[in-house]
């Protein structure tokens, strides 16, 4: 096991070396606190404000609406709970059933405080019907939150249509774009709130953004020194913020070439897995318009995903699963359940996700190893394919 | 999350497979919960008349811990008299593996239950009295199986996967 093959880039990505180079000065030489008056402080402030302008440029956004957070989980929480605090009279939220837990659990918490939450169903590929959003909006609706691209399946949501109809109805629209930035075009002009995270974009962990539109009023969740225009107190993570801006720049500047390359790897992966492994199924969408280029999710009948991931790990490959046995609450993935994957197939799920560093040889190695590992686990099981 | 001993059994499972000749099978678990174990035992009389588990093997669908605990139970039971094998507990299985992560402790119960059920099946087929402790455990396993079947009744009706219907259940999640 000399070289590891990392195919879990939807979980996190390695920092790009160019991004790291941008960050390093802000960890030592330029270590100032961006709120300080002196030279070191002014250097840090400039770096933070340059990064803010940069990210605003990428999103075609007003820099004053770029709020740095500790990551996308905090950004999602701030979008939902911050809006709920500022408009307590509106007590209805619409989200999809396959949102990230940062969104779902924030909504769950509000539900326990008496809010109405509409969790929209998705089709077999994981797509929300815009008409279902339109049908769910009422005069009490505070927010619609639908992610741009799903982190387990890679399925892209019709966020332009959803954003447009939210505009017509005067309801703010939030999208968690963590997996989508740099991998698809975002209709930011019809979006009021966008969550981003650096570490999914070959940037550092522990930093993210909530982009807040001009018509949205939030109240903070974190109180203190009044940083980020009072919306998120706490000394700025200067090196992280610089890294986030560099990662965003990298991903969007090279979006077209990299997505094309990742798409080709994904297609090769999907075609070969489905033809070389019996009783294998793709979860989500195959289509270039319907899916992100870097995530492919499979289910294998009569396979338990946790042991599959561990066997692959033994062979030097990092992947992940939506199996119950891999989750702390021993429940299979809510996303796979929402798209109607039978529970026994959800146990046998495998998510493979491609990064900028992934090369064709990595996919070929996986394709050489995976069929044998699946066969080995199936041979240990009391179920034989074709029984019954 | 798993210790080296568990990983060793996962990498090189002992006594894995189906016995060519066996006296009974203990079947526990439910595919809807993500783990199913079948434990095969061959029981033979020794010269002094003791009934010994002379051979044992297993087939398991499940996570790393399910595979490692199946492997460990088979080692603990092999060569034991039935009376000795009945006393093997889930905590013994976990301890012998150097411990399991807390959410995975149920796998050790499942493995010990599979052995229990195999012995129960053997004694029942032989038309022999069932020791009270074995009977109690069997009743608990059957109760959980029923609960699971009720809990997953909707899913079982929906599924087109015939092989998972009517499989025995046990406490597993």
Image (tube, grey):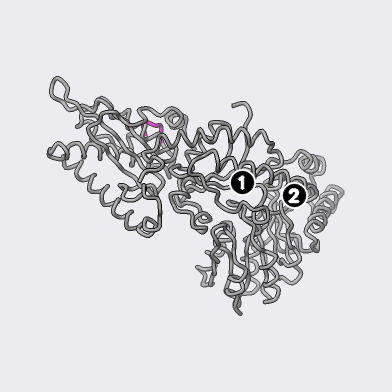
| Magenta span | B95-99
Q: Main secondary structure of the magenta part?
A: loop
Give above or below for B44 relative to A117.
above
Q: Nearer the viewer, mark 1 or mark 2?
A: 1
- Label 1, secondary structure: give it: loop
* Marking on residue A11: 1
Mark number, residue B168: none
Q: Residues within 10 Å of mark 2 (few under 14, many from 20)?
A: many
Q: Is residue A384 magenta?
A: no
* Residue B90 left/right relative to A61: left
Side of A185 where A343 appears, left or right: left
Question: Which chain is mark 2 on?
Answer: A
In front: A87, or B60?
B60
Q: Give x and y (percent) for residue A320.
A: 55, 43
- Which sits in the foreground, B107 or B35? B35
Q: CA distance from mark 1 to mark 2?
A: 16 Å
**Residue A71 visible in image:** no
Q: Residue furthest bottom?
A: A139
Question: Farthest residue in the top direction?
Answer: B47
């Amino acid at each position: 096991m000399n070289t590891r093959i990392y195919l879990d880039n939807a979980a996190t990505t390695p920092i790009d070396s160019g991004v790291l180079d941008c960050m390093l000065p802000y960890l030592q030489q330029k270590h100032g606190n961006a709120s300080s008056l002196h030279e070191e402080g002014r250097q840090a402030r400039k770096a933070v404000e340059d990064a803010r302008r940069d990210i605003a440029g990428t999103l075609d956004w007003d820099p004053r609406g770029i709020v740095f957070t500790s990551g996308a989980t905090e950004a999602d929480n701030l979008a939902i709970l911050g809006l709920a605090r500022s408009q307590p009279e509106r007590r209805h939220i619409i989200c999809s059933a396959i949102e990230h837990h940062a969104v779902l659990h924030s909504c769950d918490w509000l539900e326990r405080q008496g809010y109405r939450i509409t969790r929209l169903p998705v089709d077999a590929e994981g797509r929300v019907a815009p008409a279902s959003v339109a049908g769910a909006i009422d005069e009490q609706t505070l927010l619609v939150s639908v992610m741009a691209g799903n982190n387990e399946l890679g399925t892209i949501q019709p966020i332009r249509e959803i954003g447009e109809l939210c505009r017509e109805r005067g309801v703010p629209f939030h999208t968690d774009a963590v997996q989508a930035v740099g991998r698809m075009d975002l209709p930011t002009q019809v979006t009021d709130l966008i969550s981003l995270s650096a570490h999914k974009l070959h940037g550092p962990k522990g930093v993210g953004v909530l982009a807040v539109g001009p018509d949205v009023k939030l109240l903070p969740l974190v109180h203190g020194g009044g940083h980020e225009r009072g919306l998120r107190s706490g000394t700025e993570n200067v090196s992280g913020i610089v890294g986030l801006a560099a990662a965003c720049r990298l991903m969007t500047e090279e979006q077209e070439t990299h997505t094309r390359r990742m798409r080709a790897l994904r297609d090769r992966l999907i075609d070969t897995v489905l033809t070389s492994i019996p009783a294998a199924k793709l979860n989500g969408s195959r289509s270039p318009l319907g899916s992100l280029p870097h995530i492919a999710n499979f289910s294998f009948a009569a396979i338990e995903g946790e042991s599959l991931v561990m066997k692959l790990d033994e062979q030097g490959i990092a992947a992940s699963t939506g199996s119950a046995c891999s989750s702390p609450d021993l429940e299979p993935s809510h996303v796979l359940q929402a798209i109607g994957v039978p529970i026994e197939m959800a146990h046998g799920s495998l998510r493979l996700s491609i990064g900028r560093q992934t090369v064709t040889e990595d996919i070929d190695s996986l394709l050489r190893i995976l069929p044998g590992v699946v066969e080995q686990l199936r041979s240990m099981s009391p179920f034989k394919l074709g029984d019954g | 999350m798993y210790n080296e001993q568990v990983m060793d059994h996962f990498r090189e499972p002992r006594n894995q497979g189906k016995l060519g000749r066996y006296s009974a099978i203990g079947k526990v678990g439910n595919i809807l919960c993500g783990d199913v174990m079948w434990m095969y035992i061959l029981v033979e009389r020794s010269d002094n008349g003791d009934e010994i588990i002379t051979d044992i093997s297993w087939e398991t669908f499940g996570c790393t811990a399910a595979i490692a605990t199946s492997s460990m139970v088979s080692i603990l039971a092999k060569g034991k008299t039935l009376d000795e094998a009945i006393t093997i507990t889930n905590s013994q299985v976990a301890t012998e593996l150097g411990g399991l992560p807390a959410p995975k402790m149920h796998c050790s119960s499942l493995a010990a239950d599979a052995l229990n059920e195999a012995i129960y099946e053997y004694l029942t087929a032989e038309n022999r009295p069932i020791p009270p402790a074995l009977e109690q455990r069997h009743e608990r396993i059957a109760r959980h199986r029923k609960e699971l079947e009720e809990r997953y009744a909707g899913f079982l009706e929906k599924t087109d996967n015939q092989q998972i219907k009517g499989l025995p259940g046990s406490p597993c999640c």
